[in-house]
Amino acid sequence: LQYGLSRGFLPLREQLARETNTSADQVIVGGGSLNLLDLFIRLLVKPGDWVFVEKPTYDRPLILLRRAGARVRGLPMETDGLNTGYLARRLEEGERPVFLYLIPDFQNPSGTVLALEKRHRIIELARQYDFWIVEDLPYRKLRYRGEDVLSFLALAPDRVLQMSSFSKLISPGLRVGHLTMPEQIAGPLT
């Protein structure tokens, strides 16, 4: 019952790393996924920086971004997820986000699942315009039918921070979240 490592309980980090085919050094466990997102925002976002989100999206990240002074650009949704054409136009017109925040699986509030082709297009744009993809996956393990679509982390581990929590799987009051990311971000975030 002593304080543990600042990256979180190692056996849990090792289990999460196995699930994402990463290393335990890339996983941080904290007091809910929003707590970890807040730390990430404080590390990388300066007042006036652009951050892109789906529109509509889960409201709590918007609160954190506004507190940090970020300029938030909502990107319209389609039946198969984010409108990637609109994203490309925003980038072509000079808006440079620090990151794009997405809930690609069973998006909140729309419930859509982002198509695989769109995931590939977003990764292509992230590499071309040098921004991070933050994929929030609280609902991914709650699939009851259909096939899983590859996660952004599986497709582009060098450009993605994947966050989730146990709130939807076990209990909302548990407040245990995890963030998986490249070591170049995990070290400074820790």
Image (cartoon, rainbow, N blue to C red):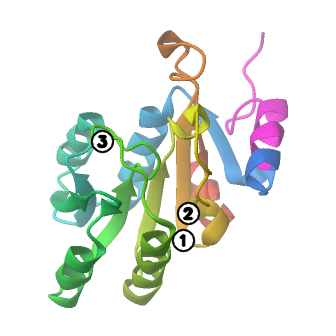
N-term-proximal mark, 1 vs 3: 3
- Identity of the amino acid at label 1? Arg
Does any portion of residue 157 appear in the rendered image? Answer: no
Splitting the image into 4 quarters, where does residue 45 fall?
bottom left
Residue 73 x/y as whole percent: 16, 62
Badge 1 density bin: few <14, some 14–19, many ≥20, Cα 10 Å:
many
- The span shown in magenta is 1-17
Circles 1, 3 touching at the beta carbon (< 8 Å): no
Name the residue nearer the viewer: 141 or 124: 141
**Tag in front: 1 or 2:** 2
Residue at image mark 1: 159
Q: How far apart, in angstroms, are the residues tagged by discs 1 and 3?
A: 19 Å
Asked if the magenta segment contains residue 4, the reply would be yes
Residue at image mark 3: 61
Name the residue nearer the viewer: 162 or 30: 162
- 134 to 110, vertically: above or below: below
Badge 2 density bin: few <14, some 14–19, many ≥20, Cα 10 Å:
many
Residue 28 x/y as whole percent: 64, 42
Q: Is residue 159 left or right of residue 126?
A: right
Q: At x 44% / y 53%, what residue is drawn?
A: 104
N-term-proximal mark, 1 vs 2: 2
- Local secondary structure at mark 1: loop
Circles 1, 2 touching at the beta carbon (< 8 Å): yes
- Identity of the amino acid at label 2? Phe
Residue at image mark 2: 152
Specify the farthest residue to the front.
Answer: 145
Name the residue nearer the viewer: 46 or 79: 79
- Identity of the amino acid at label 3? Pro
